[in-house]
Image: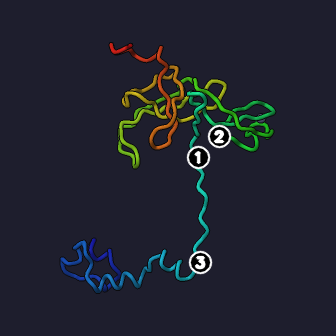
């Protein structure tokens, strides 16, 4: 029984009241005893764990003179490019340094996501983009959200989405002209 499983054995009301959204006073007391609030317990004991600094793992985009560039990295020894600045090259182990890469790139693969994803509104056009002389990054494709960038087509970084994801757009020459070209 669903209602019975929600509470500790013997504490739940055996009638339809167990299915009500508001627990009976007896059940609420039992639940509070069984599982005290973690925040209150930590504050009372003074043993709260130090906050862990969360680093955004997504490639970052910066703007230089109106041009969007990837804030990536590059090996000083073999020039291998990385999507984020790294202290050491993943290929040769040489020292890495920040490098701003782009904005042009070529679509390696692409898809259109039509299922709901928490924090995002479908449809979403996504593409793996090989930046010119740079790394491959996962980016959103702007413009018509249902547009799936064909592999091999040319795109360029334009910034970030409202959620902070890298955003590319088809190059003007490759974009389908729909009569409203100015
Ligand atoms: Zn290297």
**Looking at the image, residue 112 lies above or below residue 35:** above
Left or right: residue 144 versus residue 109 is left
Vertical side of 176 occupied by 156: above or below: below
* Image color mode: rainbow
| Residue 94 in the figure: left or right of residue 50 | right
Q: Are marks 1 and 3 in contact (CB under 8 Å)?
A: no
- The span from disc 3 to disc 2 (Cα, nearest Å) is 35 Å
Where's the N terminus, which quadrant?
Answer: bottom left
> In this rendering, is residue 109 above or below 6?
above
The quarter holding residue 112 reads top left
Q: Which residue is tagged 1?
A: 57
> Which of pointers 3 and 2 lies earlier in the amino acid sequence?
3
Q: Disc 3 designates what residue?
A: 47
- Residue appearing at x 35%, y 81% in the figure: 8
Say which element carries label 3.
loop
Q: Residue at x 52, y 20 (%)?
A: 154
Q: Which disc, if any, is residue 11? A: none
Where residue 38 appears, as percent x and y from the top left, is: 48, 75
Q: Residues within 10 Å of mark 1 (few under 14, many from 20)?
A: few
**Image coordinates for residue 45, horizontal then vertical, percent:** 56, 82
Disc 2 crowd, CA 10 A, few/some/many (<14, 14-19, 20+): many
Q: Position of residue 118 (x, y in %)?
A: 40, 49
Indicate which disc, 1 or 3, sits on the residue closer to the N terminus. Answer: 3
- Earlier residue among tags 2 and 1: 1
* Residue beneath disc 2: 84
Check contact, mark 2 vs mark 1: CB within 8 A: yes
Front-lying residue, 147 or 4: 147
């Amino acid at each position: 029984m669903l209602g019975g499983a929600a509470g500790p054995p013997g504490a739940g009301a055996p009638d339809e009241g167990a299915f009500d959204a508001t627990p009976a006073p007896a059940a609420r007391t039992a639940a509070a005893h069984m599982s005290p609030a973690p925040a209150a317990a930590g504050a009372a004991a003074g043993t709260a764990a130090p906050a862990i600094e969360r680093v955004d793992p997504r490639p970052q985009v910066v703007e230089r003179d109106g041009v969007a560039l990837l804030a990536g990295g590059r090996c000083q020894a073999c020039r291998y490019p990385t999507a984020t600045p790294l202290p050491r090259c993943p290929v040769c182990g040489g020292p890495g340094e920040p490098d701003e890469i782009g904005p042009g790139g070529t679509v390696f693969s692409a898809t259109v996501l039509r299922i709901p994803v928490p924090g995002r509104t479908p449809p979403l056009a996504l593409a793996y983009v090989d930046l010119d002389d740079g790394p491959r990054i996962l980016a959103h494709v702007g413009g018509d959200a249902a547009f799936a960038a064909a592999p091999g087509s040319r795109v360029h970084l334009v910034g970030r989405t409202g959620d902070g994801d890298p955003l590319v757009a088809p190059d003007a020459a490759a974009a389908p002209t729909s009569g409203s070209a100015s």
